[in-house]
Amino acid sequence: MAELAVDVAVVGLGPGGEAVASRLATAGLSVVGIESRLVGGECPYYACVPTKAMIRAADVLAEARRVPEFAGTAQVVPDWGKVAARVRDEITTDWNDQAAVDRLVGAGVQVLRGRARITGPGVLVVGDQVIRASRGIVLNPGTDPAVPPVPGLADTPLWTNRDAVSATAVPESLVVIGGGPVGCEFAQVFARFGAEVTLLQSNDRLLPLDEPEASALLAERFAAEGIQVRTGAKITSVRHDGQRFTVELDGADPISAAQVLVAAGRKSDLADLGVGSYGLDESARGVAVDEHMRAADGLWAIGDITGKGAFTHMSMYQAAIAAADILGEEAPGAEYHAVPRVTFTDPEIGSVGLTEAGARAAGINVRVGITQLSSSTRGFLHKAEGLIKLIEDADTGVLVGATSAGPTGGEVLGALVLAVHARVPVDQLRRMIYAYPTFHRAIESALADLRA
């Protein structure tokens, strides 16, 4: 077998892997980046970027439909062809990763296509090539869509996020399995483009990791838009007769639909990676790392596989820390007390830090403040649905969590992320000047509402 000797091997070239490989190469190390799929990862081709283009198009339709409420009359005729063309031609370049490859090569990274398997400390096999990485290996393999073990489901022509993003037409009816961020975003997009959508959620509410008030807000909007939401749903089987899907439910009538979209989580295969060569548990759901992303001596892991949040911004954050550690630079370790997350539905739901339930479970002496966006002048003017919810540690007088739901909820979240991350005293937040009339001014009202 051919052999390649390098300083560092990076397995998986999603955003974080790309960033750490480029940083190490520009610092003078010899680096090989290994990718079995598209270089650039899930985000630019099947997740963050194309889905937000789809959401932008769906939001434009929804806003146009509000013209009679505010300004006159308008005729709205959805055209999915424009969305599909933009995703194909402008966003993904027809799912071509050459630009990403060129970026890496330009930074001095050798790009190798194939599936990597670790066979020993610092040693990997990719096809018929052996790679020896003297300084070590960085793992950034990402995840794949998980298909629940529902009888018959895996044998049907189901969609995952990858199929939905590349869809050239909107199905006349759609069952979405999963009520997390991905399922909710797709459900609203396809409903706004004319699909009859039913969302099945095994949990008792949408977005179960977010505040219940945010879940209720989104459920109300979905109901207003004709999206059928069934919480506590137990799917017993799924079949496809060549034309339509039939989804059987425990204690409820079956659902017939033209398409099924599975958005029920992600999975990784540690055994396939061969992490057991470093003494790690290959049956685990992820790889445990310390504050400098070290999983073992000479092994670093970043991104989804670390279990700190399946977000591009998390992968990029961890990439910078891992690169600094490999280069021997003095740098702070990772902190996760202020991780931001946004579900890009309408209303948009941004969260940071702990929820109220999470804070109470952690034994924190909690004070909660909440305000409806409609009570703010900007919210009133926009006839906007939304809320700001703040979670304070009453003993320290700082926010440990917050939610911003409403128009541009993820942007309003920025001020709250700063407050939680920097542990800005609540008293100081109260003394700030909040521009009027803005959505973020509602933060001031939520601060005034803080109570035990």
Image (cartoon, rainbow, N blue to C red):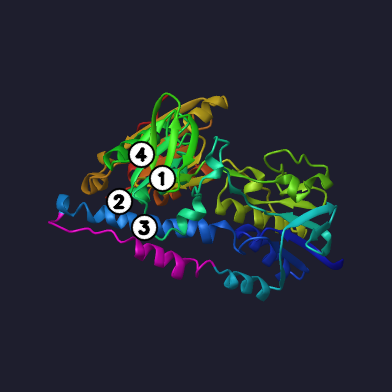
Mark 1 or mark 2, whichever is nearer to me: 1
Q: Is residue 175 left or right of residue 289?
A: left
Q: Please state the horizontal and vertical placement of residue 258, each as a whole percent of the image.
A: 39, 47
SS type, badge 3 = helix
The residue beneath circle 2 is: 194
Mark 1 and mark 2 residues within 8 Å of each other at the beta carbon = no
Real-space CA distance between mark 2 and mark 4, rounded to the nearest whole angstrom: 19 Å
Instruction: Read off the residue under disc 1.
Output: 244
Magenta part of the chain: 71-95
User: Residue flagged by tag 3: what amino acid is it?
Assistant: Arg
Location of mark 3 (residue): 56
Per the model, the C-alpha gap separating discs 1 and 3 is 29 Å
Image depth: mark 2 or mark 4 in front: 2
Give the numbered dot on residue 331.
Answer: none
User: Which badge, 1 or 2, is on the more N-terminal residue?
Assistant: 2
- The answer to whether residue 283 of the structure is visible from this angle is yes
Between disc 2 and disc 3, the foreground one is 2
Q: CA distance from mark 4 to mark 3?
A: 17 Å
Residues at marks 1 and 3 touching, judged by CB atoms closer than 8 Å: no
